[in-house]
Amino acid sequence: MDKNYEYMRVAVAVPSLKVADPSYNIEEIIKIIKKAKEEHVRVIVFPELSITGYTCQDLFNQSVLIEESQSALHYLLKETKDLNMFIAIGMPVRADNRLFNCGVAIKGGKILGVVPKTYLPVNSHEEKWFSPSSQRISSQLNLCNQEVAFNEKMLFKDEGSDLCIGMEIGEDLWSSIPPSSYHSNYGANLILNLAASNEEAGKTEYVRDLAKIQSAKTITAYAYASAGQDESTTDMVFSGHCVIAENGQILEENKTDGDYLYSDIDLEKIRNEKHGKAYLYNLENKDYKYISFNLGYNENAPLKRYVDKNPFVPSNLSERNTRCDEILSIQSTGLYQRMKKINSQKAIIGISGGLDSTLALIVTVEAFKKLKYPLSRIIAVTMPGFGTTDRTYKNAKTMMKEFGVSIREISIKDACIQHFKDIGHNINVHDVTYENAQARERTQILMDIANMEGGLVVGTGDLSELALGWCTYNGDHMSMYSVNSGVPKTLIKYMVRWYAENKTTGKLKESLIDVCGTPVSPELLPPDKEGNIAQFTESSVGSYELNDFFLYNMVVNGYGPEKIFYLAKIAFAGDYSEDVILKTLKNFYRRFFTQQFKRSCMPDGVKIGPVSLSPRGEWKMPSDASYELWMQRCEKIKL
């Protein structure tokens, strides 16, 4: 990568070993470290007691094993003195006339610190050989002729980056309040777990979930390396299970032995997420010790992590179907509760035959089922205009008929023609006035019918349109409850298709699927000579796939233009040229800033996912904020 973009390459490693043979084990460890160097790894963590092996049992009481493990560490320090790599390795350490199960942090031939294990497992004999950190007396010890810090409340801060590392060992993760919870509160953004978890049926999934959830709870990256198959099988089997998670997402995992695996963790993403969750901090223990070192970010290495081009849409089919079901339930519950609380008996909704109004109709139908109202109380209004095509018109009529809702058809042509005469606008000039007059006429019709019927106008506009301001102010921008305002365009088509394939049959199913294949258009300009859609939304605002990617990475991850462009190039390689990506990115920023005034007065609508642009939600910005800073950054991007 040309810039580091605040990525840090982290590896978890499981070396081959011989139980109670530190000399052999350290050679295997060094082999992996050398391979990791070639892959530009900056941080690497090995399993618990990896210098000796975890399963030495009463051999831990033998002085010769402890002495040889120190000799092995001394050799490791010598062999890695020129390496720009943070190495966390497990070994037994004597202190205060006790033996501790420790993680040792080294960098550039120096021992940065020694972290003793806090929680010893109660279902093993580990407490027979080791003392927990609560029995630590000294805060310093001599190891390999170096005076080093000895403390379970210790963090390692990189002066060359935003990296702050905390360590915990094995069973620490399983405790009700793991040490990493405190580490995070005091600034850690990467937790290393040196573990030795034996295999049991179902345990792999449990450990994965522990690491994943702890990374989410602490808003950190979590690197977990467990002892491998070379451990003794006298009573247990070990697999070398390794996990790298980041804020609730698994980046890399292996379930059985393999030298090592690595990923690039995103320190900027973690930092931005922590900024938004500062209220979680609980600074009760003030005796933390900080150790400084100098490492720096990744340099000249291709990004090693998956970049999802559809961050709002789960890539796994089963997970996506579950998500669609869940979102529809949230949407319909929101509308159901609103209508119940205001005692509204009817819903009025405009149906165009496009994606948004189709999903809004589905949501309204599901809400009425919860209300136990007859679907005939849903007044669906199709309002053909100058740009309406046969395809969308027929789909609109078919859906309304097959759902069993009340159907009204009101052409807006005559009303708009009269309006153009009243304001002195030439009907042959197809400008913004020509388009917006139609949108406002449709909204007026819906609002007036709602007044007549004592009903509620259901809004159809989606999250992506709100982000780009692709709606007519006081036109389709306005409603009495906006059910789609939290759903991005890239997800809507999957929701409609999922509903069609799982909840409908016959003509309704066919119509819903055809809606999914219809080009996105406001249909405000006349069709082409063949009667097909001539106005394509994405020709004006750019691909919704790109815009949703930009929206997620700007609002959720807090990235700037350069990093978003860098990630978009990776995610959309082969789909869009760099020139198209940059052009769309510039347009996104311009529209996102200049259209905030529409979001500042948007109607109520249920929050669905991580992004809500409601002024009553997480995102708040002034309507007259300047976008020049972001555009200047865009202009500096080189293709």
Image: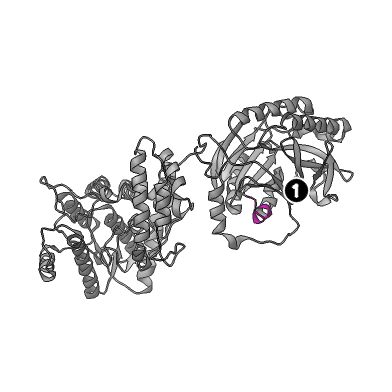
- Please state if 53 lies on the left or on the right of 395 as rendered: right
Coloring basis for residues: one colour
**Where residue 372 sits in the image (x, y, percent)?**
33, 65
Residue picked out by circle 1: 119
Does the magenta portion include 568? no
Residue 245 picture quarter: top right
417 versus 270 height, above or below: below
How packed mark 1 is, by other alpha carbons closer than 10 Å (few <14, some 14-19, many 20 or more), is many
Q: How many marks?
A: 1
**Where residue 508 sits in the image (x, y, percent)?**
24, 50
Would residue 247 be visible to someone looking at this image? no
Taking depth in this image into account, of 181 and 600 the one nearest to the observer is 600
**Where residue 298 sits in the image (x, y, percent)?**
57, 38
Q: Secondary structure at mark 1?
A: loop
Amino acid at circle 1: Tyr
Q: Residue at x 82, y 30 (%)?
A: 71
Residue 67 picture quarter: top right
Q: Quadrant of the C terminus?
A: top left
Would residue 180 be visible to someone looking at this image? yes
- Please state if 263 lies on the left or on the right of 324 as rendered: right
- Please state if 480 lies on the left or on the right of 119 as rendered: left
Taking depth in this image into account, of 353 and 399 the one nearest to the observer is 353
Does the magenta portion include 187? yes
- Magenta span: 182-188
